Structures are given as C-alpha cells and as structure tokens.
Amino acid sequence: MNQLNRELLATPGPLLLIPGAVLLPEGPVDGWAVVVGDGRFEDVGPADELARSHPRLRAVRLPGHLLMPGFVDAHHHLTQSFGAALAFGEPSEIFRRVWVPLEGALDEEAAYVAAKLAALEALRGGFTTVADAGTRAGVDVDVVASAARDAGIRCVLGLICNDADDADDRGGKDDGRSGSAAVLDRAEKHLARYAGDPLVHPSLAVSIPEAATERTLRATARLAAEAGAVVQIHVNEHLAGVERSLLRHGLRPLEHLHGIGALGPQLLAAHATLLTPRELTLLADTGTAVSYNPVASAWKGNAVAPATAMVERGIRFGLGTDGTRGDGFRLAEAAEFAQRLAYGLVTGDSSCGAGWTWLEHATRGGADAVGLGARTGTVAPGLAADFLLVDIDTPELALSWDLPWELVRRGNRDQITAVFVAGRLRMWRGRPTHWDDAALVRRAAELARAAVGKARVTRAHPTSTAARERSMAR
C-alpha cells in the first residue's frame, strides 16, 4: 500500500474503501466495499453497487487487504502496564503482592502514561476497544479516560465500587469515604460523566464479589442495567477465591452473585475459569457475559474457562488479555489453543471451535460482552467504523484455503497495515498517526523505574536470570 493511499485514508471522509475482501459475520466476501463517514459505516455492500450509489466519492482501492472488525479486549487493567514481567512465573492471586502496591505507587502522570502505554500496545495489536476493569491508583479515573482518548482507542472504563471491610486490600475506596452510600453516589456520577462521549463508555467494577457488600452488588447491577452499561467482576478465577467465598457465604462466587440477584446481562464476569455444570446453566439462563482470558489462564491461572461449552450453551463471551500482551491475533490463537489442550484433546474434538468461533468472539462477541454490541464489533451500516486493514498477500496468508482459520492460526500484528477507530486512521504499520509513541515509551521507562522502586512489590520467584544462576549452582 503506497503513501498516496495513506494520505487518502487519513482524510476526514466520507471514504469509499474497496479492499480485496471484507470480513462479515458469515465470513469473508470478495468484491465488496464500505463507505466510511461521520465515524461510522454509512454503507456496506457489493463494490459496483456502492460505486453507483455514491458517484461523488473517490474510490480508495486496497488490493491484497482484508477489511475486518477491530479486536475487542474484553478484560484489561490499563494502569498495570508498568508491571509487565513482574508477574511472570508467579502463582495465582498476585493482586495483593504486585498490582495493589504497584498501582498505589502511581501519581497522576504515571497513571496517565501507564494507561496510554497499554493503549498503544493494544492498538498495535489490532484492538480498537478495551474494557478497563478499574484502576487502584489514587487518581481521578478521568486520567485513564484522557489517556484512552489521546491514544485514540475506544474504552469501556470501569470505576471500582468496593465497599466491604477488606475493600482496600483489593483496591477500591480512593476518596477516603466509606460506606455503600458514598460508593453508589460515585457510581451514579461516573455513569453520567461519560454519557455521550464518543470513545469512553462508563462501566462499574467490583474487584471480586467479597470486596463489596450485598447492597452494593445489587445496586451496581441495577444502576448498570438502567444505564445500558456493564459491571465488571473477577469471578471464579482461582481456587483460593472459590474457597474464600465458600467459607464466607457457603456458596461459590458465581452462586453468591446469583443468590443476591446480581447476575444478568449487565454483568461481565472476568475469567470464570472454575465453573460447575450448574454455574454454566446459571450463566446461560441469566444472560450473563464472560471474559474468556486464555493467556492469563496459562500465565497465572488454575484452569481454563470452558469456552466451547459456553458456545454450546449460548453463553455470551468475549476474549480478554487481562493485560498480558496486546496482540489480537495471538489472543485468538491462544483461545483456540487453550481449549484444544484443556478440552479438545481429551475428547477427540479435532475441530475445537472450527476457527471461526475465536475470531467471532474476539470481535462481535467481545463487543456484545462489554455492552457495545449495538455500537461496534461488526462491519455493518450504522455501526462505528472500528476496523483493521490486514495484509493478506503475505507468505502466511496469500495461499488461502480457509481465511478465518488462517487468521486464527497464522495471523499476527505485523500484518496489520492500518487501524481505524470511529472512522479515523489511528495506526499505520504499527505507529500512531497523530502523536509521538517513541517519546511516550521513553517517559514510561523513566516513570516505571521510579514506580516499581517505590512500590512494595513481593515476588514468590526470582527473575529468570537469578533462577538460572541458582540452577547452574545446583
């Protein structure tokens, strides 16, 4: 793709784009085009028909490229980007030892830079939307919103609403006030604060069910449902969390949420790796959504969410990174790979989602799970023009027999030529088009060293270099 096309793509529009293929929900189609204007897809259909119906638009031809929906990261922690490898090789439930102290060491600038750094990585990996599960940093959450806007990514922005006795241990009360009334007052203001924002969509969050009172869990569910938003809660992620809930409530975390009336379409249950057959039924019956986070399961989990069973039960779910790595294609591959290892091999399921499942839930399914299914996630008239231009003339994809499968198994972020969010060109060949990413990375390196030095991070294992030295000594 030449420089002229980049300049045309960066114009305000409207634009008539004619790629080599367009990825629709039913699969890739050749000979189709889209009209992008006012931040959305104004028209989608056969290229010759769109050329006739929009004669005044100059056609921008994009041979050898697939136009596909942008990836949706259904679970992220944007202000944890300074931690990176601090969590590598660590056992489960690292939030107390790593994330709470690290985020607590962030001032306003550090929180902004950390969030923008995470957004940069996400955009480079083809994500056009991220769902942030709330920051523990003691700053106004609008700092994170500003970072997302400035980076140019769509963000479902969580506000942590913890109010139980041990809430501070899991991050929550950042204004010194206590009690459900104060928390719910902040929740209502947060939902109203971003109403109508083109890129930031408010959400509520509770770290884990035990971090909020039953009153707050019920009230946040109601407030989110009324606002058309989601409540993000880490649910059934680790054995320790399940056991803690059993001791406290006599119920598993998901069962506890069901018992108090907090399940429903407004709930986005992060992880949900440890599910009984009954809990799968509860998810299906209530319309609750799940963020399936396969890389996080491999890096620090006790199990892999039964996503193929969720597909069969009609359970809504998206794919999330949990801040592990911002690469949409590798996330889709991990989703398939984890299901194959955990469930497919032992049952002889060689298809294990047939490829399309993971592409679907990385895009349209993810948008639905985070509450934006009516706004993004699909190439369709009226929806936000959040999309990728993927080079399919590469050695990995040019000899195509089954493009959806190949995108899952062989796609990578190096093949992403352009990333559009709300109809604007945001990334070109891995670099932002409107701001200096190199300066951001340099500043992030400086601030990260200071923040980690200040935070009281405790690791169970040494660094890889230290571990090698110990191994050699033995």
Image (cartoon, rainbow, N blue to C red):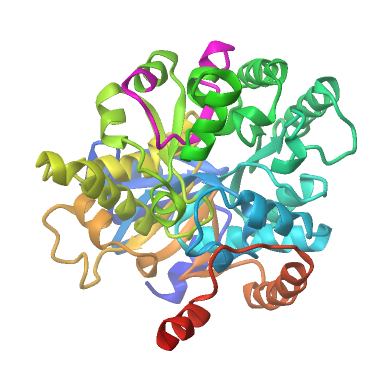
Q: Is 45 displayed left or right of 181 in the figure?
A: left
Q: Is 47 displayed left or right of 323 in the figure?
A: left
> Is residue 258 one of those drawn in magenta?
yes
Residue at left offset 56%, top offset 25%? 247
From which residue to which does the magenta span run? 257-279
Q: Give the vertical position of 19 relative to 183 (above or below).
A: below
Place of residue 432 in the rendered image (x, y in percent of width and height, measured from the top left): 58, 67
Q: Closer to the camera, 187 or 393?
A: 187
Q: Is 249 displayed left or right of 292 in the figure?
A: right
Place of residue 73 in the rendered image (x, y in percent of width and height, measured from the top left): 49, 47
**In this view of the protein, can residue 342 be seen by the observer?**
yes
Residue at left offset 44%, top offset 15%? 286
Place of residue 56 in the rendered image (x, y in percent of width and height, measured from the top left): 45, 49
Residue at left offset 73%, top offset 56%? 101
Q: Give the vertical position of 180 relative to 376 (above or below).
A: above
Q: Closer to the camera, 469 or 252?
A: 469
Instruction: State which quarter of the image contains the N terminus.
Output: bottom left
User: Looking at this rendering, what residue extends furthest in the front direction?
Assistant: 474
